[in-house]
Amino acid sequence: MSELRSRPRLRDGALNLADWLAEPQPATAGALNVFAGTVRNTHEGHAVGSMTYHAHRALAEARLREIEAAAEARFGVSALVAHAVGKLEIGEISVIVVIRGGHRAEGFEACRWTIDAIKSAVPIWKEEHYLDGEARFLEGVPIQPVESL
């Protein structure tokens, strides 16, 4: 197991994409698909100043690893994911999905499935902080078991 694979998937503060691309590309991989979600400055007409991510840490960590394993089994790829917790500023990276696979088709499919699974199965909640001084938690979705996705 590489050092990267042994790291926690739930990280305090903004993520650094380069850290998650450090694992060498397997010789069998002809595709590298990456998704990085960032904090944007507007949501539903509100000017956003920052975002705080809250998580059930133990369950979130377990679910992130479970999603990696499910993506690998389902699509025949290598998957790494990470999600930030804590306060992030506009433009900072909050979630990363790195998929390495034999071909682009399964890589794209695995990448999309993985980010959708994170949003559906991991207990992480977003609290937006608006420029007018107000803050609110965004409405989420009921948390689903990974095997049902």
Image (cartoon, grey):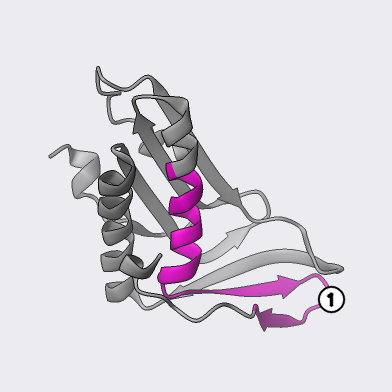
Identify residue for label 1. Answer: 132
On whether residue 114 falls in the magenta region, the answer is yes
Q: Residue drawn at (27%, 58%), measured in percent from left and top? A: 65
Q: Position of residue 90 (x, y in %)?
A: 68, 54
In reply to whether residue 124 is colored magenta, the answer given is yes
Q: Residue at x 52, y 42 (%)?
A: 35
Query: Is any part of residue 15 visible from this angle?
Result: no
Query: Residue at point 28% right, 45% down?
Result: 72
For the C terminus, the quadrant is bottom left
Between 94 and 97, the one nearer to me in the picture: 97
Give the farthest residue toward the right: 45
Mark 1: which secondary structure? Answer: loop
**Badge 1, how many Cα within 10 Å: few under 14, some, many 20+?**
few
Residue 136: percent from left, percent from top: 68, 82
Name the quadrant containing residue 107: top left
Q: Amino acid at mark 1?
A: Asp
Q: Is residue 141 left or right of residue 33?
A: right
The magenta segment is 110-138
Horizontal and vertical percent position of residue 121:
41, 70
